[in-house]
Image (tube, rainbow, N blue to C red):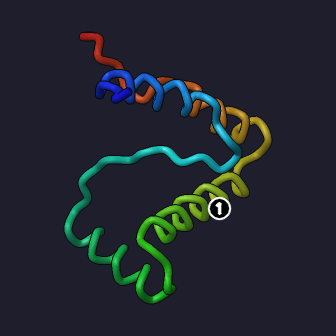
Amino acid sequence: MTMTNAERQTRYRTNTRVRQENYTARLNTELLFGAKTALKRLSLHHGKSQREMLEQLILQAEQSLRQSLNEEEDDRYLDLSMQALRSNKKK
């Protein structure tokens, strides 16, 4: 039996709620052309995909930041991920 698009989407959302340790998350964004070009050069230089390169850069930046924080600052930093990224409510 063929599933409708809505049924497929519902199944996908249900299945992705159970997260594995190294699950992926979609990031859709636009970058400045210079940043995109630099990412491409970096990835080619290191023999990695652009995704792998971007993941490495982000994780290295976070590791560097967290090493510079004391325990209280690090706890506050980690709590930031629990906050909503934006609000659609008018101020």
Location of residue 42 in the rendering, given as x and y in whole percent from the top left corner: 42, 81
Quadrant in which the C terminus appears:
top left
Label 1 sits on residue:
64
- Numbered disc 1: secondary structure: helix
Relative depth, front residue between 62 and 10: 10
Image: 21 above or below 49: above
Location of residue 73 in the rendering, given as x and y in whole percent from the top left corner: 70, 39
Image: 6 above or below 67: above
Q: Residue furthest bottom?
A: 45
Relative depth, front residue between 28 and 57: 28
Pointer 1 local density, CA inside 10 Å: few below 14, some 14–19, many at least 20: few
Q: Residue at x 45, y 65 (%)?
A: 51
Is residue 27 toward the left or the right of residue 55 in the image? Answer: left
Quadrant location of residue 68? bottom right
Is residue 74 toward the left or the right of residue 84 in the image? Answer: right
Quadrant location of residue 33? bottom left
Q: Residue furthest left?
A: 33
Q: Residue at x 24, y 10 (%)?
A: 90
Quadrant in which the N terminus appears:
top left
Q: Residue furthest right?
A: 71
Q: Residue furthest front?
A: 1
Image: 86 above or below 57: above
Image: 74 above or below 18: below
Question: In the image, what residue type sits under mark 1?
Answer: Ser
Location of residue 86 in the rendering, given as x and y in whole percent from the top left corner: 37, 25
Q: Residue at x 27, y 76 (%)?
A: 37
Location of residue 22 in the rendering, given as x and y in whole percent from the top left corner: 65, 50
Relative depth, front residue between 7 and 91: 7
Is residue 18 toward the left or the right of residue 28 in the image? Answer: right
